[in-house]
Amino acid sequence: MNDHRNHRYRESGPAWPTGDDPDPRASGRAGQEESQERTGFWSPLWEDDDEPAGRPANGHGRGGHPNGHGRHEAASNGRPRHEAADSGANGHRWPDADAGDRRWPDAEPPPAAPPRPAPPRPAPRSSGPVWPSGDPGAPGARRPGGPHTPPPGAGFPNGAPGPNGARPPAGPATRVVRPRPAGPPRPGAPAGPEAEGPTELLPPVHRGTGPEPQLLTHREPDYDEDLNDDPDLYYDDEDEDRPLGADDRRRRRKKIWRRVRRTAYVMTALMIIGPIVAFFVAYQVVEVPDARAVADSQGQVVTLNYSQGETLSQIVPATGTRQMVTYEQLPDVVKHAVYAAEDADFETNPGFDITGVLRAGWNQVTAGTGGGSTITQQYIKKATGDDDASYSRKAVEVVKAYKMNNTYTKEQILTSYLNTIYFGRSANGIVAAAEAYYDKELDELTASEAALLAGMIQLPGMDDDMAYMERRWKFVMGQMLDKGWITAEEHKAATFPGDALRPKDEARPDAATGPAAHIQTAVLKEAEAAGYPLETLRRKGYRIQTTIHKGAQATAEAAIQDTLDGEPANLFPGMVVVDPKNGEVLAYYGGKDGNGLDWAKVPQEPGSSFKPFDLVALLEKGKGLGETYDGRTDRILGGRKVRNASGASCGENCTVALAMKKSINTVFYDIALNEVGTKNVAEAARKAGITSPLMPEGGGNPDANISIGGGKTQVSTYEMASAYATFASGGIYHKPHLIKAILGPEGETVWRPDQKTIDGQLAFDAGNPERNRQIARNVTESLLPIPEYSDIGCDDNRPCAGKTGTHQYRDTEDNAKAWMVGYTPQISVAVSLAAEENRKQVPLKDKNGAIIYGSGLPGEIWQAFMNSWLEKADKMTFGKYEPIGKTASEGEKSDDDDRDGDRGNQRSSDKPPSKTKTKTNTPSSPTTESSETETETTTDTSDTDEPGGPPLPTFGRPPGDN
């Protein structure tokens, strides 16, 4: 079957036979044996109606081609007309009528129709198809037998005219149709081929100028050809509502998944190629730090200012705090210890550890802990001061580490790192660290000592936490053993070098002196907690604006100095002044020797000053100051004998208000143990502002000694001033703080306390502000009589609330700790007093050898400060008192009050007994924690004038030092 799809647009049509042919008839007869199915371009399927308008059927008669077919001449209407070409060598001729060729009719063809006026045609191309000449080698000639060659014998004889003596009109529309076989003649018609047979030649029809013929190798597809060879890429969506068949769904799924796969391929490629490109781009632009420049930049002065702007102290790098060392001067034991602590693969990695980086990223996403920095990365972080917890910073750090690894040797990097890293104790660099910790030269360090130094790199601010230091030392020693840097025998024989540590006060040549030194230390710890350790502050020369008020600090120091003038030198007071409105610490006194123990921050037994938290827990249950309890001494509570100091009593039905005033132990012990629970007492203290741990480490509830501030209950002067400030502010807790702002080198603020700290929060009832205020006001109501009752009241009848407290010294009648904590609406002040000799706790004795109570020297210091500081301040009240629960009657008296008659003769248990009063209580035997078989023991109380408690070690000292 012939393919006719492209016949209409073939580049050139068939060529007419030329006059050079020897005998077209002979060739015609030779081709009669061909199958009649072979029609070539003489296809009967070509219809005039299928011809494109104005396009030659076979490309004949194009203007400008000297093929003898014809020429275009302009007609009268401006359109070209096609005239027959002159006869010549290439002229077309009709076959002879008597040639016997059955492909051509014997009869004359019908007269040719006059040519139609041809429409305007486009300008001829520079070259186009030409009619083939008789010479195969002639230009434009088509090889005989080509796709457009007429069948053999189809040409006219050389120079023979067509039927009726005329040539068939030449033109693109000329068509030759193969004749039917001759049939019987019709009546009256001559024999031979049918005279009225099918038309053999049609006159040219010009329907306008069409496009140029297409090349067979670059043709337009037919309308019925599929543009896409892959039927799975597209699906017929002409009828989207029709149900999809299985093939349609398969093709759709295949198409969707193909797109998904291709998208995944692209995304995967971008994920792989993108970071690689970014890495090498960043590599070209980043700069690595210079060790010497970094060391110099870390030596800037850090200035601490008072809240008003005056200079409080300056931290100036002293000579010897940093000494540069060469790689050859680093002992192997030091290098191995640092590798074990920070980067075991330092000598082989490319500057970063990809698994560590991924682990650090995962920890950051999941809020985990731990990083993945190598020594090179840590050096860059410390050197640049860029410690931002962001992915971009980490990525740049990796690039810098890689570049530094390619720029410097491992020896140079390690040396730079150990010369600049901070080790705590104000020591920058490994040489200064060896001196600060052990007072040794670098080459004198043992493996155990080097392991401790390397372990402190991670958190140098923990240089006074022995438990942390020992934990890090064990880790480093284990790593050194695993890597083969020490033997199993050396590891087994090693001991924690805690005893070899140099006293910290000797290792800080840059510390301020006197009371300001403790302020400086406390401020720097707070800055480190805020993300600004000393090494960062030094690097850029930051300034810290503290909350310390210069006038308040001077008043506090004067009150302490004047009160303790002439008193024993082994007395160590601690004092903290807090503003109840915002939690700012206005004055801070940790001791006159700034390098000694900070008594403002050291946790100590608070004694009876802890009793207000018992009352808070009771008020939260809806019971108030009018509730009555058995206030007699020597009561058995929880299997223990509880007694009141000096044998005091407030009767069998003693109100809470009176028990607070007289500091009756049995009442508050009973409340904590049987009424509210010791856990709720601890929770009440926490709400007020106590941050020291009050719950047992092994779980469970605190013992009942928490009710009277004894046993294992230890809090700091700093915390007590803050907690009482919560009462002063009407139940609003403000986190105490020493830093108002951290300022950069140009004076810009880089850090300040968050707004929550400044605004505060409801302490005791977060959902009910009025009840929260009411609880605080009820506590204040119970504390208002105590300063005057203890002979330490404020001048000018100023309303002052407070509570004294003492803690017994071992099993003697002496006291180990004495407190006075009190407040006005403007200020909260806590004063503690302890005694030590050779770093061991001793009894509190004044210059006359008398026992010191809370209303004694601590109360006098408190009173001196309040009267001086508030001398010109407004006299403010605490607001309206609205009682919770039962109300204590104003005229209520205890049995002891009736007995003594004069209220002034009945001293608080925190005041020294009357000089004329003789003690009748006999010392109790030393006791320990009660066992299950004991039915009655003497409680380990604080706030007692009589012996009876077990020995209690001083905080921070090993038991053997007691």
Image (cartoon, helix red, strand yellow):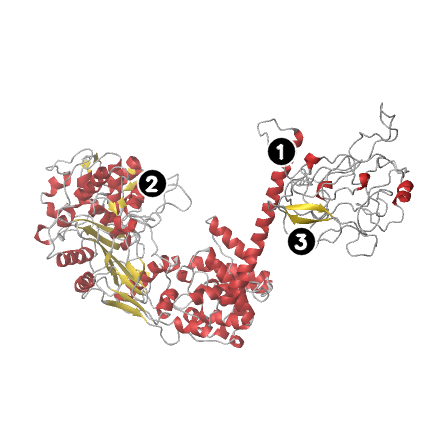
Q: Quadrant of residue 431?
A: bottom left
Give the residue pinned by disc 3.
125
Sequence-first tag of 3 and 2: 3
Disc 2 residue type (three-letter): Lys
| Residue 479 at x, y percent in the picture | 55, 60
Q: Secondary structure at mark 2?
A: helix
**Nearest the eye: 654 or 752:** 752
| Residue 908 at x, y percent in the picture | 17, 48
Q: Is residue 300 above or below residue 270?
A: below
- Which is closer to the viewer, label 3 or label 1? 3
Give the residue pinned by disc 2.
679
- Which is closer to the viewer, label 3 or label 2? 3
The disc at residue 236 is 1
Residue 478, visible in the rendered structure: no
- The answer for how far apart the CA atoms under marks 2 and 1 are is 76 Å
Disc 3 residue type (three-letter): Arg
Disc 1 residue type (three-letter): Asp
Sequence-first tag of 3 and 1: 3
Q: Quadrant of residue 113?
A: top right
| Residue 680 at x, y percent in the picture | 31, 40
- The answer for how far apart the CA atoms under marks 3 and 1 are is 41 Å
